[in-house]
Amino acid sequence: ANRNNLDGYLLYLEGVVLKKLDLRSQAVTVLQSAVAAAPTLWAAWLELAGLANEYEALDSLQLPKHWMMYFFAAHAHVELKLSDQALDA
């Protein structure tokens, strides 16, 4: 499908399918588009956090400048057991 015509919710769904198919890098790309298109879609942020399994991967994500990013950063750092960074997020 042409991703330009998809809203954040459909991009999220595509990202979930790609993740289930173990196409991680493609899932990350699509989920980044999902949170950019629908920044308050917390489910997309959670899927993205589950794919960023190390600090470097988390740091390299292209995320929208939105207040939800701070909740995502705190959640992801806790998941990675980086509590000091979670408090700074």
Image (spheres, grey):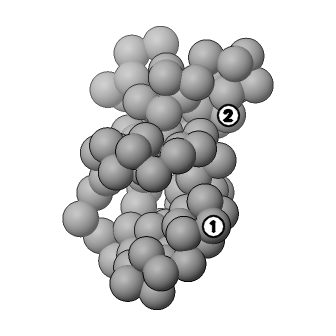
For residue 55, above or below residue 75: above
Residue at left offset 49%, top offset 39%: 31
Q: CA distance from mark 1 to mark 2?
A: 24 Å
Residue at left offset 30%, top offset 70%: 66
Amino acid found under the numbered disc labelled 1 = Lys
Q: Quadrant of residue 60?
A: top left
Q: Is residue 77 visible?
A: yes
Q: Residue furthest bottom?
A: 87
The spot of residue 45 in percent (x, y) is: 54, 56
Indicate left or right for 79 with 68 as reference.
Answer: right
Indicate left or right for 53 with 22 as reference.
Answer: left
For residue 87, above or below residue 29: below
In the depicted view, which residue is nearer to us: 5 or 88? 88
The residue carrying pointer 2 sits among few (fewer than 14), some (14 to 19) or many (20 or more) residues within 10 Å by Cα, namely many
The spot of residue 52 in percent (x, y) is: 53, 44
Residue at left offset 39%, top offset 45%: 56
In the depicted view, which residue is nearer to us: 78 or 8? 78
Amino acid found under the numbered disc labelled 2 = Val
The spot of residue 20 in percent (x, y) is: 76, 25
For residue 1, above or below residue 56: above
Q: Is residue 36 visible?
A: no
Residue where numbered disc 1 is placed:
81
The residue carrying pointer 1 sits among few (fewer than 14), some (14 to 19) or many (20 or more) residues within 10 Å by Cα, namely few
- Which label is found at residue 52? none
For marks 1 and 2 on the same chain, the one whose residue lies earlier in the sequence: 2
The secondary structure type at the circle numbered 2 is: helix
Residue at left offset 39%, top offset 79%: 89
Indicate left or right for 79 with 35 as reference.
Answer: right
The secondary structure type at the circle numbered 1 is: loop
Residue where numbered disc 2 is placed:
16
